[in-house]
Amino acid sequence: MYLQNRKQIIRLLTNKYMKFWFTILFISALPVALLSQVHDLFLDGRAEMKKEHYNEAIGTFTSGLSSDNITADLLLNLGQCFYQVNDYNSAIHYLLLADNMKKNLGSYWLAKSYAMAGKNDSAIIYLKANLSSAYKQPESTIKLDRAFNDIENTRLWKDLWSQEWYDDFENLLAEINYLTRKNEYVEILDLIDQNLAKYAQKHQIYAARGKVFLDLKNFNTAVTAYSRAIEISGTHPEYYIDRAKAYSSLQKYDLAVSDLIKALNLEPDNFPLYVERGRLYNNLSKFNMALDDISYYMTFFPEDIQAMYLNGQIYYDQGSYLKALEWFNKCLSIDQSEANFYIARGNTYLRTNTYKFAIQDYGMALDLDPKNPDTYLSKGLARYQLNDAEGACNDWQKAARLGSVKAIEMLNTSCQNLKKNGRL
């Protein structure tokens, strides 16, 4: 029944949209340069989805339908956007097209859309399809999904869950995930150790082990576990991402960059990875590559103030202080409540010998965060350069009380010398 209904639906949609597909075939003769825009349009649409601008994403994805590079993923995302704006009929249309291109890809979202449209029979049909597919959702995800609130007390729902959809290994992963959410690390490791020999060829169990050690900041062991997971199955971007976190914490920035490159090849719409890779390139003093990553990210998220701040930090580390000031000024024109923005601009003024402005910015930062010893230390350095010996030593005393070793050193050297010379 499911296959028969599905084929009927697809046939109706295909007839209705035959003109659309002829357009696709016609455009296949367009230049390659024009077709290359489709990938950008897909990323543009994904960026709008990340910002929860679903109507804008629909417009972007729809413009992408004018080329022959249409993909199941594009149709899936378009269907998800229509779902988010409560246009369930349009969602079903595009999700069915996605499902037709890649079997069961849209099954879960079709189940949600049919449920929200009040078509319970179809919702259950597609839930069964999802539970029988490679795209199977965890039981907890399905049962906690509010899309199914209106059918969870029906006979259809009870009959669905009277069947056993998950095998022993999937149930083990569900238990591990539950314990992970509760931070029960000892229990998780015991559970993994008990089952590791049995499931030695399952990449998920090594990834779960890696996650535990990553959370426990045992980064070398985390790397070992994720490396084994990747050795078994290197198609999961999250494994590369988490191993990159471990490498970064070990200050192995080149290896972390390599992992993020692999993750982005698998998941190019994971936009925060461009920022993280830019940060890592900056740590490696590869400033131009760092700036390229941040600039690329900001083509999608031009109003991300933390990206602006990182851009300024990269220019600062590069020694391009005027460009750094430009970005820190942008940050402060948007948000004057962040102490780090004042500190960053103050540091830049300090490097450019603009000590009066540096002191002002450090003062603003201390109004927002009065217990930062580094800010008192830097403010004291700026005052010292302006021959305000008393003010400098007062600032260093405050920094020392807050635990700054460098401030204690300045008190024992510069301030003692000033006292000897009668300048204090």
Image (cartoon, rainbow, N blue to C red):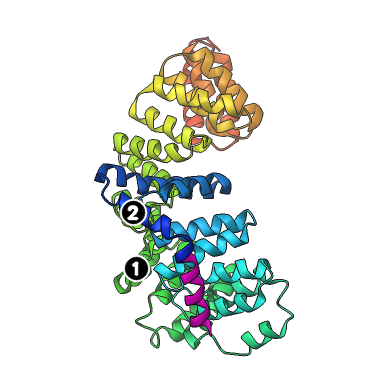
How far from the left and from the top, in percent, is residue 403?
A: 56, 38
Compute the Cα span from label 2 to label 1: 43 Å
**Which residue type carries mark 1?**
Thr
Identify residue type, mark 2: Asp
The picture places residue 303, in percent across and down from the top left corner, at 52, 34
Mark 2 or mark 1, earlier in chain: 2
**Residue displayed at 73% across by 72% down:** 150
Q: Left or right? Give the position of 284 relative to 171.
A: left
Position of residue 404 relative to residue 253, above or below, is above
Can residue 163 be seen at all in this image of the molecule? Answer: yes
| Segment colored magenta | 1-13
> Mark 2 — residue?
68
Residue at image coords 25%, 46%? 32
Circle 2 crowding by C-alpha within 10 Å: few under 14, some 14–19, many from 20: some
Q: Say whether marks 2 and 1 touch (CB < 8 Å).
A: no
Which residue is disc 1 drawn over? 224
